[in-house]
């Protein structure tokens, strides 16, 4: 299997954001939505099975209006994948405002691909 021969699974963790940009494509979504840990584990299991069935590597991408507002859920997902010994790559799309050293250390230990979205100048 080639290293770039993968399926990227986009998991929308929540509908909350700290920026509230007026041009946001998701601004009218219900702010209370957040994926449950049990649902996320089922999604991960499915993604792993499907990727293996099609002989592809598996990447799980965390999205949301701002996925770092669901950081505990991300930690749970990493722990679950480690416990299950899943061969999985992670990524996250974030505005980066909440990133701190502890998060960066966890992401680095787990080989995250981090996409920073520079959406708005904050004064």
Image (spheres, rainbow, N blue to C red):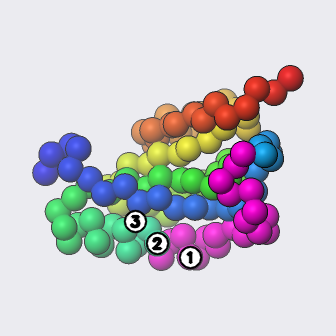
Asked whether 79 or 12 is in front, the reply is 12
Q: Which residues are magenta?
A: 23-42
Q: Residues within 10 Å of mark 2 (few under 14, many from 20)?
A: some
Residue found 33% across the figure and 67% down from its top: 48
Say whether residue 102 is left or right of residue 7.
right
Q: Which mark is residue 64?
A: none
Say whether residue 22 is left or right of residue 40.
right
Residue found 74% across the figure and 56% down from its top: 27
Asked whether 45 or 96 is in front, the reply is 96
In this rendering, does residue 114 appear at all?
yes
Q: Residues within 10 Å of mark 3 (few under 14, many from 20)?
A: few
| Residue 5 on image: x %, y % | 20, 50
**Nearer to us: label 2 or label 3:** 2
Does residue 37 lie above or below 63 as drawn?
below
- Which residue in the structure is indicated by mark 3? 84
Which badge, 1 or 3, comes first in the chain's sequence?
1
Say whether residue 110 is left or right of residue 32.
left
- Which residue in the structure is indicated by mark 1? 39
- Quick check: marks 2 and 3 in contact, CB under 8 Å? no
Label 1: element kind: helix
Alpha-carbon span between mark 2 and mark 3: 14 Å
| Residue 112 on image: x %, y % | 46, 40
Which badge, 2 or 3, comes first in the chain's sequence?
2
| Residue 45 on image: x %, y % | 40, 72
| Residue 31 on image: x %, y % | 79, 64
Asked whether 97 or 44 is in front, the reply is 97
Residue found 73% across the figure and 65% down from its top: 29
- Quick check: marks 2 and 1 in contact, CB under 8 Å? yes
Q: Residues within 10 Å of mark 1 (few under 14, many from 20)?
A: few
- Which residue in the structure is indicated by mark 2? 43
């Amino acid at each position: 299997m080639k290293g770039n021969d993968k399926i990227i699974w986009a998991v929308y963790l929540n509908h909350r954001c700290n920026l509230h940009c007026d041009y946001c494509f998701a601004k009218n979504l219900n702010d209370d939505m957040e994926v449950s840990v049990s649902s996320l584990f089922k999604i991960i299991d499915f993604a792993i099975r499907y990727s293996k069935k099609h002989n592809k590597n598996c990447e799980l991408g965390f999205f949301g209006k701002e996925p770092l507002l669901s950081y505990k859920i991300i930690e749970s997902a990493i722990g679950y994948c480690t416990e299950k010994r899943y061969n999985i790559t992670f990524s996250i799309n974030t505005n980066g405002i909440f990133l701190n050293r502890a998060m960066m250390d966890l992401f680095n230990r787990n080989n995250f691909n981090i996409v920073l979205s520079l959406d708005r100048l904050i004064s």
